[in-house]
Each structure stands twice: as C-alpha cells, then as structure tokens.
Amino acid sequence: MKFTLGEIAKIIKGELVGDSTIIITGISGIKEAKEGDITFLANSKYYPLMRTTKASAVITSDETLDVDMPIIKAENPSLAFAKVLNLVAPNDINHPEGIHPAAIIAKTARIGKNVAVGPYAIIEEEVDIGDNSIIYGGCYIGHHAKVGKNCLIYPNVSIRERIEIGDRVIIHSGAVIGSDGFGFATVKGVHEKIPQIGIVSIEDDVEIGSNVTIDRARFDKTIIGKGTKIDNLVQIAHNVIIGENCTIVAQAGISGSTTLGKGVILAGQAGAVGHITIGDGAIIAAQAGVTKSIPPFTKVSGYPAKPHDIAKRVNACVQRLPQLCKKIKELEAKIEKLEKEIK
C-alpha cells in the first residue's frame, strides 16, 4: 500500500518536517532502507546513519537535530513505526478458524464463541476456553485448565492441568506452562520426588516466548503479572511471583520462591537465586547473577551482582590484572636485587 508522508504523519500524530506529498511504498531498517522506504531512529547512537540512509523519510524523536531530509517527529519513534508497519505492510497471516475435525476435545470442555482449534490439538476434561481464542494444532491443554478470551496459543504449546490463563495472552511454540517444580528430598543418597500440587496463574496481556518453561507451584501459585513480556528460552521456577509489566529477556532463569516487583527488567542470561525479592523498577543487566535481594529502582550487573557503577569499576580492575602482574614481577625483581646489595 502507498501513503503520503502527510497521511502517515496524521495517522501517527507526529510533526512532519519536509515535503508532505512524498509517496511511501515500503518500510525498512535505517541501514537497509532504499528510496520510497520510511525508517525510524530511536537510539541516538545511530544518529550518524541519518546522514547516509537512502530512506525517503525517518521517524525520530523531538530531540533529534535537524537533517537535510524529511522527518516525522514522534514522542515514541518505535511505537510510531509499528503503526506505520501495519499500514504499509499489513499482516496477511490467516489464523485457524473453527474447530478442525482432527482436534480432540473432551465432552466436558467448555468452548466459547468464535474459538478456533487446529488439527491434533488435545483439550482435556473440564477445560474452559474463552471467546475468540485461537489454539493452533498440536497444542495440549490439561484437565481443568482455563484459557481466557482473545488468546493466541501457537503450535505445540503444552498447558498442564489446572493452569489459569487470562485474556489476550500470547504463547509461542514449544512453551510448557505448569510443568512440575524441581522439588526433591535426598534421603540416604536417593532423590525422592516432592509432589508439586500448585498451579500457574498467567494474568491478562502477557506474552510468552518460544520454549519458555514455567513451573507450577509446590502448594499455591506461580504468578506472571499483567502485561509482562517473556522472551524465548526463559526458565521460571516454582512459586515465583513476577509483577506487572516486567521484561524477562532470553535465557534468563529465576529460581524458586523469588519475587519480582512491577516493571523489573531481567536482561539476557541473567539469573536469580531463590527466596529473594527484586524491587519495583530494578534492572538486572545481562549475565548478572543475583544472589541477594535488590532494592527498588536499582541497576545491578556482574557476578555476584553489584550496583552497576561498582561492578564497572571492579571489571576495570580485572582488565588491568595482566599489567599489574607484570608490574609486581618487576617490583619483586628490584626488591630481590636491593636485598642482595644490602647483604
């Protein structure tokens, strides 16, 4: 589809600087863009690319300096660009519709209006599926589980028994919701399994990436708060409580009975031990290892995790170790020489 810059600026409620009649026929990243494309710039460190991009226009923030090309100033360039993406390159993927004859649905399952269930999906006894939800083929939904309205469950997701899922939840392929918590008691060298009889409760507007595993609680609930977004390959252990609007990035791991407040960011490959609290708005940097509770609105990094400013100084010292070792050897040689001269 084609739009003029003026039309796009009006739709995204941005301030246009430049020719409003320019026709936009495509979208692209700022490096790959060609004539006729619109792109965006949300990070100031990429500002020099605005002078070399071949894009016909750029969506950027109010703080950006003037450049010799049409721009649309927007408060949130990433969000504005997402709106343009839907305009210029609308999503033409067709989700399943209706109940496929190869789906296996228990007689006691309660299926809402306009629900789609793909082939070879299994829906067990006493399951509730809310209106307008889509269950792709190959999914498994266990006994007494509840899936809310307008959910999207991609292929090969396993939702175990008695799990509670809110409205507008998206779960990507390979995720396992409600697997047993890792609970064992070692008796005379033998690991005896401790029953995990709790559930997982996923609140509204959560998105869960591919191959995420969320363990059921031992007795009560593992909770994923409203609006939280979880990247691929994340492990969340039993009795973890994640607050609203958190961001959990790929390969992060959270041990049992740890609590995250609202708006916490856990970056890639970060890990947290069990039975601690990470306060509201805290940021855990990539590959950080959190071994104790973190106060609200604190940024930590490193292992064991320390306040980021301290961790940077520690790392700077570590990087100087080869030079320091060389200096120590030189000083030792001088001392040895002086000792010989004194004798």
Image (tube, helix red, strand yellow):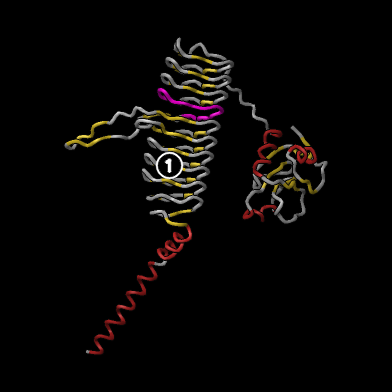
Q: Is residue 96 above or below residue 45?
A: above
Question: Residue 64: x and y, percent?
Answer: 70, 54
Task: Classify 127 as above or below 70.
Answer: above
Q: Residue 221 versus residue 115: which sits nearer the camera?
A: 221
**Residue 230 located left or right of residue 76:** left
Horizontal and vertical percent for residue 96? 57, 19
Q: Give me the residue at 44% from left, 15% from top.
A: 126
For image coordinates 38% across by 37% down, the residue present is 237
**Residue 143 is covered by the magenta coloring:** no
Residue 166 lies within the magenta run: yes
Magenta-tinted stretch: 159-173
Tell me if residue 176 can be seen. Answer: no
- Taking depth in this image into account, of 37 and 188 the one nearest to the observer is 188
Q: Nearer the viewer, residue 302 or 338?
A: 302
Residue type at numbered disc 1: Thr
SS assignment at label 1: strand
Q: Quadrant of the C terminus?
A: bottom left
Q: Which residue is mark 1?
A: 259
Crowd around label 1: few <14 · some 14–19 · many ≥20 (10 Å): many
